[in-house]
Amino acid sequence: MRDLNKRQQKFVCGCLGITSWDGKDIPFYVETMPKINDVVWVKITQVNDTSAVVQLLEYGKREGIIPYTEVTRRRVRSMGKLIKVGRTEPAQVIRIDTDKGYIDLSKKLVTPNEAKACEAHFRQGNEVRSIVCHVAEQCDIPPMDAMEMIAYPLYQREPGKHAWTWLYELNQTEDVERILGPLKLDKVVSDCLMSTLKNAMRLKVLTLFAEVEITCFACDGVEAIREVLILGRNYGEGSEPQIHLSVNIIGPPKYGIRARTDMKEEGIQRMKEAIDAMTAEIKKRGGQLKVVTAPQPHGDADDGKKGFDAEDDDDEDAD
């Protein structure tokens, strides 16, 4: 293995199922210990007669303990249904012994909203660490040094603002110096970071949807509605930003307007302007337009409900 280069070592380790990534044990944050009442993301590594041993994944896999009395408020026959080795989940810090390094956690004190926020926070932190450690590998610098140069200063720059948010803004803005300037990075490192962000943080394409009712009982009503729909479809062509609108028939008098874009606010504004133009045109022709569903991202409400239903199902299975 010592005679192989990095690419060959990674290939061999992947075939053997060995984790060879240098940054797997690096903490997400400057702080090496969480604070009491913090909700952290943990992985269960061992189960004994009285407690479960876990690793705090955000803090360099520091070990903690979840006593069985802190697992659930319900009475269960088998604790094995709720605590399984290898499972990752949120837990709240209830006690810390700084001298001995002991951390006691509770699973039953975590609310569903806190669990959801903790998972999102962990995923963002994990993505930040992956990006920074990839930059470290490409630039041949120690991963911990890269975290101290890039991620940790971003966490400390503005309280309450995640480093992931800074990197996301960096990937979208043209004013790179505003974010990277205070870090004072080498040109090689900053260029590598920007190229990594373009591949790792691809913009999320949203489907925006609106529903309208259009009626016109004039002699040329059918032709008027047809021309209004064409007006909506072609609205904004040739203007910046380029957002293509499509109009489809749901069932007369209902029509749907859709747009696929990575610019949510601009897309919603463009659809509102198109609807206003359609409303003005159909009024000239003696008809009317009624907005049934205002422009919004398609499927957001359903996805959120589905997520809560899935959590309820998991709780029932645990019972």
Image (spheres, rainbow, N blue to C red):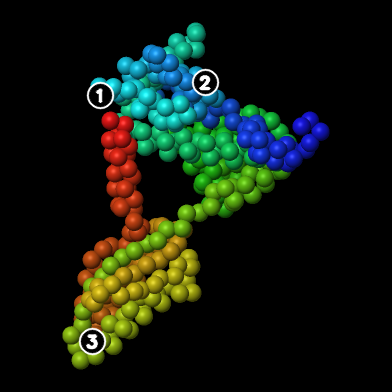
Residue farthest along the right direction in this orientation: 3
Residue visible at 40% across and 33% down in the picture = 118
Position of residue 302 measured from the top left corner of the image (x, y, whole percent): 31, 53
- Badge 1 amino acid: Arg
Q: Which mark is residue 221?
A: 3
- Badge 3 amino acid: Gly
Task: Decide if residue 175 is in sight here.
Answer: no
> Dividing the image into 4 quarters, which one contains the N terminus?
top right
Position of residue 129 in the picture relative to residue 306 (left or right): right
Q: Which residue is mark 2?
A: 62
- The alpha-carbon separation of the residues under discs 3 and 1 comes to 65 Å
Question: Tags 2 and 1 in contact by the CB under 8 Å rule?
Answer: no
- Mark 1 lies on a secondary structure that is loop
Residue visible at 58% across and 27% down in the picture = 25
- The alpha-carbon separation of the residues under discs 2 and 3 comes to 71 Å
Residue farthest along the top direction in this orientation: 99
**Upstream in sequence: badge 2 or badge 3:** 2
Position of residue 237 measured from the top left corner of the image (x, y, whole percent): 45, 74
- Mark 3 lies on a secondary structure that is helix
Residue farthest along the bottom direction in this orientation: 219
Q: Which residue is mark 1?
A: 74
Q: Residues within 10 Å of mark 2 (few under 14, many from 20)?
A: some
Position of residue 292 in the picture relative to residue 178 (left or right): left
Between residue 67 and residue 30, name the one nearer to us: 67
**Upstream in sequence: badge 2 or badge 1:** 2
Between residue 149 and residue 122, name the one nearer to us: 122
Mark 3 or 1: in front is: 1
Mark 2 or 3: in front is: 2
- Mark 2 lies on a secondary structure that is strand
Position of residue 240 measured from the top left corner of the image (x, y, whole percent): 48, 67
Residue visible at 30% across and 52% down in the picture = 301
